[in-house]
Image (spheres, rainbow, N blue to C red):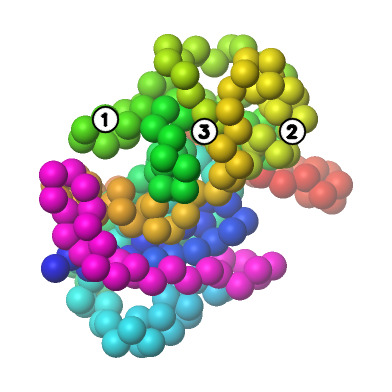
Amino acid sequence: MLRLLSLETATDRGAFALWSGDVVSFKASTTSCHVFNCPAGQPHAETLLPAVRDALNTLGWTLDSLDAIVFDAGPGMFTGLRVSAALAQGLAVALVKPVIPVSSLEVLAEATREQTGMTTLLTLLDARMNQVYAGGWALTETGWCALFEACLVNPDSLDQLPMLSEPYAATGTGIDEYPAVKTWLNQQDVVDTCVRYPTAEALVRLGAVRFASGQLTDPADAIPVYVRDRVALTTAERASGESL
C-alpha cells in the first residue's frame, strides 16, 4: 500500500497530510488520510518539520515508510513555497525517495471538485500586490487538464484571460480579496463555488495518481514555480506592510 506525505504551504493556511491507499484507473482510493494544520500566525519554516515528526509518531509511521514526498510547487506565497520545496527536498534526499510537485492551482481545482463536484474551473489565488494567479482547468478521465498556463493578472483585467469554452465556476482567495474580481464574475454569470484554498488532502490525492503513473521528480529538481519573477520587496515596501 502506498504511503505519502503532502506539504501544502502555498497560502497562509499551511497544512500537511499523511496518506495511505492505492490508485486504480487514475483514481486514488484512500485507506487513511490524516490532515494536520500548521499553527496559525507562526512561520511555516519554524513549525512544519516538528509538526510532521509529531504526526508521524502519533500514527506510528516512520519517515522511511513513506514512498514519496508531495509538495505544492506554486504559484503562491514565496516563503511558503520555499519551505515546502526545501523540506521535501531534504527529506527525499535523506530517505532516497522521489518528490512529486503539483501546481497550487490544480490542487485548488481538485479541492473544489471534492467539495462541490464542479469539473470545469477558473482558479484565482491572491498573488498579493494587487494581482491574481489564474488558471483554467477541466477534469478528464485521466485527471485535470490545464486549459491555459498559470498566469499573473490584475483584478480589473480578467478579460485578458483566455475564455473557457464551456460553462465553468470560479474558486480561490482572489475572489474575496479583490472586489473587481467578484464584479467581473457577476458580469460574466460565473458561479462562485465559495471554495477558497487548496488543501493538503487534495494535494496528496493528486500526488498518488502521479506516483502510480511514474511522474516522479528527482529531489534535486524540487523547485517552486513562482510565475511572478519578482521574489523580494524593497525596504520601503516591507516597512509599509506590503507582502508577496
| Residue 84 placement (x, y as % from top left) | 44, 59
| Residue 45 placement (x, y as % from top left) | 54, 67
Where residue 140 is drawn, which disc sits there? 1
Looking at the rendered structure, the kind of residue marked 3 is: Thr
Binning the other alpha carbons within 10 Å of mark 2 as few (below 14), some (14 to 19) or many (20 upward) gives some
Marks 3/2: CA–CA distance = 14 Å
| Image: 11 above or below 183 | below
Looking at the rendered structure, the kind of residue marked 2 is: Tyr
Marks 2/1: CA–CA distance = 31 Å
| 78 or 202, nearer to the observer | 202
Secondary structure at numbered mark 1: strand
Q: For residue 141, which quarter of the picture? A: top left
| Residue 197 placement (x, y as % from top left) | 55, 49
Q: Which residue is mark 2?
A: 178
Per the rendered image, the range of residues in magenta is 18-45
Tell whether 105 sits left or right of 219. right
Where residue 123 is drawn, which disc sits there? 3
| Image: 200 above or below 196 | below
Where residue 69 is drawn, which disc sits there? none
Q: Is residue 92 magenta?
A: no
Secondary structure at numbered mark 2: loop
Q: Earlier in the sequence, mark 3 or mark 1?
A: 3
Secondary structure at numbered mark 3: strand
Q: Quadrant of the C terminus?
A: top right
